Image (tube, rainbow, N blue to C red):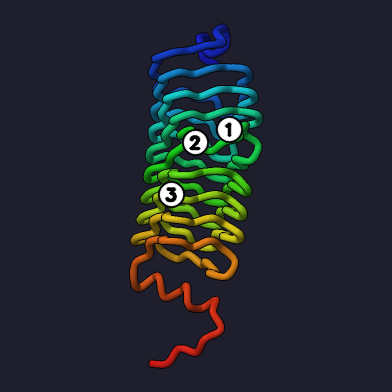
Amino acid sequence: MNDLLADVQEIEGRSFSGLDLQGKELSFKEFYGCVFTRCSFLETTFTSCRFVDCEFRECNLGLCRVKDCSFSNTRFQDSQVIGVDWTEASWPKRGFLRTIDFYSCALNHSTFIGLSLKGIDLTRCIARDVDFTEADLSRANLTHTDLSQSRFVHTDLTEADLTDATNYSIAPKLNVLKKTKFSLPEAVSLLYGLDIILTD
């Protein structure tokens, strides 16, 4: 493990490149304004860590654990964030603070059940088989994201933007859709959950 990470609890304004913590455990660390570039956190266990104003670029966070970790204004860019159970993290009781955003990331098989993710950016991502059940995605930006096999059940999508999102299956009767933005032809899939007959 990087000596700095091993010996210091609070780290501010540092850039890490090529760091390899695959399968390691990192506990009670606080990162402020740090940038991680091309780092491997594959199957890394983060416990009670804090990330504030941080950025992960081209990193592999597949199957990492985020037990009791908190995030504030943290951005993931061009990264693999596959199979992460985000419900293990510590989230603010009120959804007013900016927490996490994803840009051009792979989020397959991840879980966001019941989380307040108001205003989250999840753009140009591959988010297949992701569970958004009972999550608050109001005002979320999901544009250009592949949502194949992802679950939306009792999900709040008020004023969310799904323009040019693809492969989603969202039942209007089981979710909150108010001023939600969709684009054709994908929006036609919303009709499949209704008791109607479509004719040519």
Name the quadrant containing residue 184: bottom left
Pointer 2 residue: 96
- Could you tell me which residue is drawn at 62 percent across and 49 percent down? 113
Kindly identify the amino acid type of the residue bearing the numbered disc 1. Pro
Residue 51, percent across and down? 50, 24
- Could you tell me which residue is drawn at 55 percent across and 34 percent down? 42
Please rate how many residues cluster around mark 2, counting C-alpha atoms within 10 Å: few if below 14, some from 14 to 19, many from 20.
few
The answer to the question of whether label 2 and label 1 lie on touching residues, with beta carbons closer than 8 A, is yes
Residue 29, percent across and down? 57, 17
- Could you tell me which residue is drawn at 65 percent across and 36 percent down? 88
For the N terminus, the quadrant is top right
Kindly identify the amino acid type of the residue bearing the numbered disc 2. Phe
Distance between the alpha carbons at the discs numbered 2 and 1: 8 Å
Mark sitting earlier along the chain (1/3): 1
Secondary element type, mark 2? loop
Name the quadrant containing residue 159: bottom left
Tell me if residue 39 comes above or below residue 130 in the rendering: above
- Could you tell me which residue is drawn at 54 percent across and 49 percent down? 136
Q: Nearer the viewer, mark 2 or mark 1?
A: 2
Query: Could you say which is closer to the camera, residue 92 or residue 36?
Result: 92
Left or right position of 78 against 23: left
For the C terminus, the quadrant is bottom left
Distance between the alpha carbons at the discs numbered 2 and 3: 13 Å
Secondary element type, mark 1? loop
Q: Which mark is residue 140?
A: 3
Distance between the alpha carbons at the discs numbered 1 and 3: 17 Å
Secondary element type, mark 3? loop
The answer to whether any part of residue 43 appears in the image is no
